[in-house]
Amino acid sequence: MNAKENVFLCKQCGNFSSSELCEFCTERSEEIICVVKDPKDIIALEKVKNFSHQYHVLHGTISPLENRGPNDIRIKELLARISKGKTKEVIMATNPDVEGDATAMYISKLLKPLGIKVTRLAQGISMGSDIEFADELTLTRAIESRREI
């Protein structure tokens, strides 16, 4: 009951928070935003040393087989954040599977005309696996080797 009454979604990034804005949004620069599928992916990425960027949680991915399109996840909110003009790069950290890749490519096509650098985690993470189960070294190499898409 206590969690239901005291845990909210951050108004900016969509992560779980006990206040209006989460600690990542209040304490970190908006120059680089790391886009993830679920809040649990943030926990995995926070294990990586020297990675201190803001996040944006989509709460899902584009999946035609599950009847989930771009309007069913938090893409509009991401575009609204970027329209403020402070963001220089967006790291697509969705899972390396069909839905994650489709979502990354869709968002990339929306952001490229805005002059935003869009990168994708390198293939240090096995295809078809989930980011939350990747070890720290694999995630570190994936982030360091990210590439523009």
Image (spheres, rainbow, N blue to C red):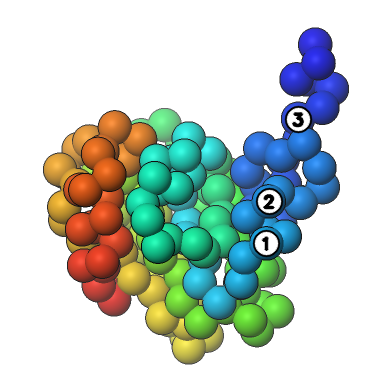
Asked if residue 15 can be seen in this view, the reply is: yes
Q: Residue at the location (20% across, 58% down)?
A: 141
Asked if residue 76 can be seen in this view, the reply is: no
* Amino acid identity at mark 2: Glu
Secondary structure, mark 2, is helix
* Amino acid identity at mark 1: Glu
Which label's residue is closer to the chain start, 1 or 3?
3
Q: Horizontally, is 12 left or right of 29 in the view?
A: right
* Vertical comparison of 49 with 28: above or below: above
Instruction: Specify the quadrant of the image occupied by residue 75.
Output: bottom right
Q: Which mark is residue 27?
A: 1
* Vertical comparison of 138 with 52: above or below: above
- In which quadrant of the rendered image does the C terminus lie? bottom left
Q: Horizontally, is 63 left or right of 17 in the view?
A: left
User: Residue 68 at what x, y percent from top left?
Assistant: 48, 39
Task: Say which of marks 3 and 2 sits in front.
Answer: 2
Instruction: Specify the quadrant of the image occupied by residue 18.
Output: top right
Which label's residue is closer to the chain start, 3 or 2?
3
Q: Residue at the location (26% across, 66% down)?
A: 144
Query: What residue sits right under mark 3 in the picture?
Result: 7
Secondary structure, mark 1, is helix
User: Residue 127 at what x, y percent from top left?
Assistant: 16, 43
Q: Residue at the location (68% across, 68% down)?
A: 80
Query: What residue sits right under mark 2 in the picture?
Result: 23
